[in-house]
Image (cartoon, rainbow, N blue to C red):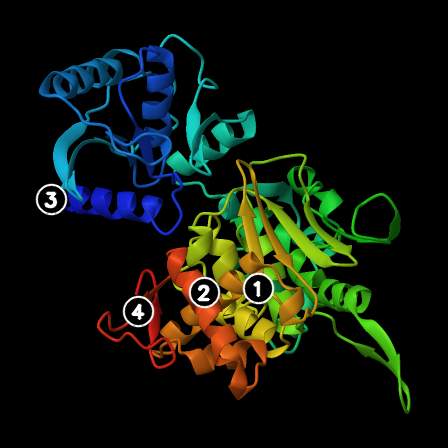
Amino acid sequence: MSNWKECALDALHKSLYPVPQELNEIDWKGGLSNKTDRLAQHLCAYANLKGGGVLVFGVNDDATYEELSKETIEETTKKLGNIAKNNLAWSIQLEHAVLDFEGHPLLFIRIPEQQNKPIYLRGRDIYEAYIRSAGHTVKMSREQVHEMLAQSHGLTFEKRVACGGISAERVLELLDYRKMYELIDRKIPQDSERIIEQMLEFSMIEQQEDLYNILNLGAILFAHKLKDFEALKMKEILVRKYAGANNLIMELEYKMDRGYAVGFFDLLDTVMAMTSKERIIAKREAVPTYPKVAVREFMANLMVHQDFAITGMPITIEIFTNRIVMTNPGSCLNDVNRLIDLPPHSRNEGLAQMMLQLDLCERRGSGYDRAVTAIEEMRLPAYKVQSGDDYTRVMMFPEKALNEMTKEEKTVACYQHACILYERNEMLTNQAVRERFGLDKNKNSVASRIIAECVERGFLKPYDDENTSRKFTSYLPFYG
């Protein structure tokens, strides 16, 4: 079986289990629609998607199966082939196959990613282009079209010019080179030429004869003021603290309008101060409500994984009495149920690598592990992630007794703990669940009920199907 077919079957399985949900890379279809324009939009979106995607016919919107006749299969492949040839800005080649999935013959139509993007609808302008977002086909914004055009020509966000044709002296006025040397733990050179050379080595700037261009990478990380750069002035980070569980009454607001590296630790300290509670025993002290490790990791993710093509939506950190909510522009690139185990995907690899070098985020792939471990050590409920068409939202919640948690909160916390253990090459047991929730030894039945609910939801599976004892059974995440 060719690689794309194996990947398609795997993507379908991931979209159906443990909770049915359409993913960016695969779309279920119960049958062939007569809406040619909408089908063209789907083909367009997948042709613009990294890695392309698949339409699978024979799966209804409610995740039930539809029997496909030979005539239906032939009609579907013919119609989509004609749309791919005649209804897009330029023709693309589709592949198809009828594959068996759990006893059901399904038609898979593969739409490969195109090299020259964006693909848009024939007879329209380039802004009639589409993309997949949070499992849906949506029209691209003008900014997203411009972003894709630039990336199609090898010009990533980080490499684009934020401010061009300026002197070396002006570069050093606009960028906080002192903070750069503090973060890389080196002394500031006496010679300004050496500072400029270092910035060139870090790809923060580029030379243009006797003048220089500040690139987005340098500006977004080390700007004294983001408003000095036209394209970045709306990329500030807002922190808002509210008086209650809604946003009706705002108590405090903090705006980080500096480069992300320059203001990172001040931002972190501000969030920790706004979320901590004051306690007086022998002396006055602030007691954290949320673990600093988790706040730091989630905060770094806001910066690194944002979609810079989305305008009018700054990164926000909102602090309520019963939760902290962090929102960044751009849908989540990974399945929200697999953030702990899957390698991270970033829209901004250069930015991610630079923040790693500056020790502003954990080594790739370990940050979520550390964040969840810290959340568990403080006996907090599980973190939650929501992904929309143009945003990703991460939520943390303060300490809550087990008997105050909802069934959903217990289930998700149990699943996340199983993921952490699996990454350590360990398995979830009744004892592990009791330790996660701080339960006594005589609470075996409580832990068993939580595990049973997690298994019923499809998040866990027994390591040994033949072991009928809940107390001594080991469990793996559904993907293990």
Tell which tag, 4 or 3, sits nearer the viewer. 4
Mark 1 and mark 3: Cα distance apart in space: 39 Å
Image vertical order of residue 382 relative to residue 233, above or below: below
Residue position marked by numbered label 2 in the rendering:
415
- Assess disc 2: are there few (<14), some (14-19) or many (≥20) residues with their C-alpha within 10 Å of its C-alpha: many
Q: Left of 79 or right of it: where is 24?
A: right
Can see residue 201? no
Q: Left of 411 or right of it: where is 297?
A: right
Give amino acid for label 2: Tyr
Query: Which disc is residue 2 wearing?
Result: 3
Residue 187 point in image, percent of width and height: 65, 78
Residue 302 point in image, percent of width and height: 60, 54
Mark 4 and mark 3: Cα distance apart in space: 31 Å
Tell which tag, 4 or 2, sits nearer the viewer. 4
Q: Nearer the viewer, residue 263 or 214?
A: 263
Residue position marked by numbered label 1 in the rendering:
382
Mark 4 and mark 1: Cα distance apart in space: 22 Å
